[in-house]
Image (tube, rainbow, N blue to C red):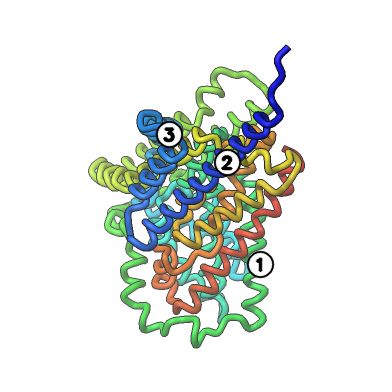
Amino acid sequence: MSHTDPMQRSMNGRTTVMADSMILINTAVAITAIVVLIVRFRLSPVIALVLGACYLGLSTGLGVEKTVDTIAEGFGDVMADIGLLIAFGVLLGALLRELRAIERLVDVLLRVFGPKRVPYGFALTICTVLQSIFLDVLLVISGPLARSIGSRLGSLGKARMATALAISLECGIVFTVPGAAALALASLLDVSLGKYLLFGLLVVIPTVVLAIAVMSFFFARGWWNADVDELPETDLDSTAAVGVGGPGTAAATELRKPPSLLLLFSPLFGALLLIAAGAFAEVLEWKNPVLELLGSPILALLLGVVGTCLVARKVLGQPTVEKALGAGLRDSGQILLLNGVGGCLAAVIAAAGLGDILGGYFSANSWAPLLLVWLMAAVLHVAVGSVTISAITSAGLLAPVAPVLGLDPVLIALAAGAGSLFFVHLTSNTFWLLQSLLGQTTRGTLKTCSVGVSVASVIAMGPILALSAFL
């Protein structure tokens, strides 16, 4: 019988520790380099993420061929999972925008909820129903509407509506299917979209309501000063003219008899219900070929697009529908690229073996991994200023840990989304759009957007940690 020399075993242990340490160090260098390239040198996030993935693969010993193959496979896997979903979601949003469905929905909310509760109804609608619409487009359309409602809610109306809009927009894209970041997170962590839809709703609804309530509490106690937090009304005229019209105004003048809102939104609602039904059937282990087919996210959203096209064609005519679809396809390009290259980095991180290394630091029943992924996403967001980049990068870092720990991947996805919301600030395009469209000063926007969304980021961990006790 042969015996291993104790000194040899010790040397092998030290070699393993050194190799693991180098992987951790090179991963930190890659993430830092991505941040510096984006923030300091204003390099496109798409290019910066691919360069970071290349460095990490080469520095951790994957070699040139495997690094390139892993990057390509990571991009392809994400596109296979969510490429069509993003395209269909954006097309749905483009059609609803052309139909002016959002403006009409806001009028209904104001009548139903009344002035006191309308910020909550407005925010919940934005973060759940309207996530198929490209973020900046949704903001440009809904911003002037929120400001108009705010002017009818008293001295704190603008602050309450600005906060409600900021929180709902940012929470929606990370927690709600088919939000762009939510689709990417589900793909990176191999979470079914039906499951993400269900658990995302369990997180986003209480988060949005509680965050708005907390901010309203502080505003009511003197934290909002209209003299320094709001712009004079005369400064808003040109902004209002641009915002209220929006892309759908010209088409709206062609409407002879506006269709009911239920008809306009029924294809989208139907698609989401099919996805949710498919998820319930999967959880209950109920096998039904028809439901499996119709409840698949790709087919469900495709049916939603087809249904909305038919409604829009009847209301607006075929030329306007084709124009809206063309605009939607242009909008989807940058979303697809950004999410795809996020998959490149995540694939290289997994191939480098980071999951096994990090798995040794945590226990299976510990909250530490969820808090760590939240912290990583928060730090990345403060540095880079992009919710999507910070969410998919932090999720990619800890995705390999999920099977090692026995954690349900949906928890890591939701924690990454929550952390990526922390401190939306001056590097974010959303920040400046909210400032101009809601008539706020920079100081006021820091309160409603930066602080408001950060409050939501922290509150969201409550439902997520509660869910971890049952999953």
Q: Amino acid type of disc 3?
A: Gly
Q: Which quadrant: the C terminus? A: top right
| In the image, farthest residue toward the bottom | 227
Q: Amino acid type of disc 1?
A: Ala
Q: Is residue 289 left or right of residue 58?
A: right
Decide: few, some or many residues near mark 1? Use Cα within 10 Å; few <14, some 14-19, many ≥20.
some
Mark 1 or 2: the one toward you:
2
Q: Is residue 75 left or right of residue 465?
A: left
Of 48 and 446, nearer the camera is: 48
Mark 1 or 3: the one toward you:
3
Q: State the separation of the CA atoms marked 1 and 2.
A: 50 Å
The kind of secondary structure element at disc 1 is: helix
Of 92 and 455, nearer the camera is: 455
Q: Which mark is residue 74?
A: 3
Disc 1: which residue: 213
Decide: few, some or many residues near mark 2? Use Cα within 10 Å; few <14, some 14-19, many ≥20.
few
Disc 2: which residue: 18
Q: State the separation of the CA atoms marked 1 and 3.
A: 41 Å
Q: Do the residues labelled 1 and 2 touch (CB within 8 Å)?
A: no
| Residue shown at the point (51%, 68%) measured from the top left | 449
| Residue shown at the point (43%, 82%) measured from the top left | 231
Of 17 and 175, nearer the camera is: 17
Q: Amino acid type of disc 2?
A: Met
Which quadrant would residue 433 be assigned to in this image? Answer: bottom left
